[in-house]
Amino acid sequence: MGGVIQRVMIVGGPGSGKSFVATRLGALSGLPVHHMDHIHWLPGWVERERLEKDMLTREIHAKPRWIFEGGHSRTYRERAARADLLIWLDLPVGLRIRRVLWRSLRHLGRRRPDMAEGCPELLGRQTVDFLRFIWRTRETSRQAVRRVISPPPDGLRVVHLTRPAAVRGFLSGCRGAPGGGGLLAPAAVIAERPTEAGGHGGTCDYRGLR
């Protein structure tokens, strides 16, 4: 275990499990959980103005304690500079697409807990467009994360998880600090390896999960 973690940044493509991991870590640690979708969307699936999203994300960055899951890569560098731990859920795109379809069916007509008010799950043209977006951005979204963590800001610990089993293993190794004082997580680093374009070039490298 490393030191007590007070600020956790969770990134990954749609369907990678960001909300699930954030909720689990929040329950363990007592840290407040923030979902980017609450900022990104207004009721009726209306996208918030970009500059307003910048301002709202920065308000969270400035807080002393948080778990912040989601995108808005314009503010990734600022978020990473404030975070103690960055968790990158870098799961295969096929798995992520299946998960997105399943959650749309599971919550059809209802709002997911991690989604903004007034934004129920839909199944139709919007779903098809979203799945195309996931496929189209499968590499550019990974590159945005790599630009932040290669190298990471001073003091930032990075966990790069590429398999569901590794995600489960990492969560099983996390603990809450006494009195809800933050998160204790396995010591971890990123292991970079050269790969061909489109490959997963990093792997989780921490004790007990090889």
Image (cartoon, helix red, strand yellow):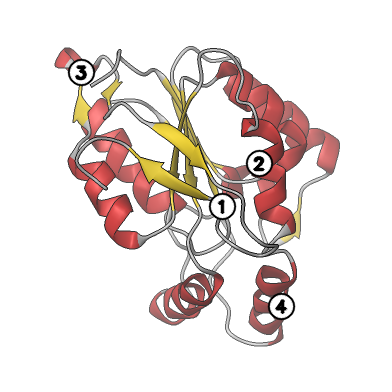
Q: How many marks?
A: 4
Judged left or right of residue 174, residue 103 is: right
Q: Secondary structure at mark 3?
A: loop
Amino acid type indicated by mark 3? Ala
Amino acid type indicated by mark 4? Arg
Q: Secondary structure at mark 2?
A: helix
Amino acid type indicated by mark 1? Gly
Q: Mark 2 and mark 1: span between their CA atoms?
A: 10 Å
According to the image, label 3 marks what residue?
177
According to the image, label 1 marks what residue?
201
Q: Are marks 4 and 1 in contact (CB under 8 Å)?
A: no
Task: Please name the residue shown 34% across and 44% down the image.
Answer: 23
According to the image, label 4 marks what residue?
132
CA neighbours of label 1 inside 10 A, class few (<14), some (14 to 19), many (20+): some
Q: Mark 4 and mark 1: span between their CA atoms?
A: 23 Å
Q: Which mark is residue 146?
A: 2
x then y, percent, for residue 66: 45, 25
Amino acid type indicated by mark 2? Arg
Q: Mark 3 and mark 1: span between their CA atoms?
A: 32 Å
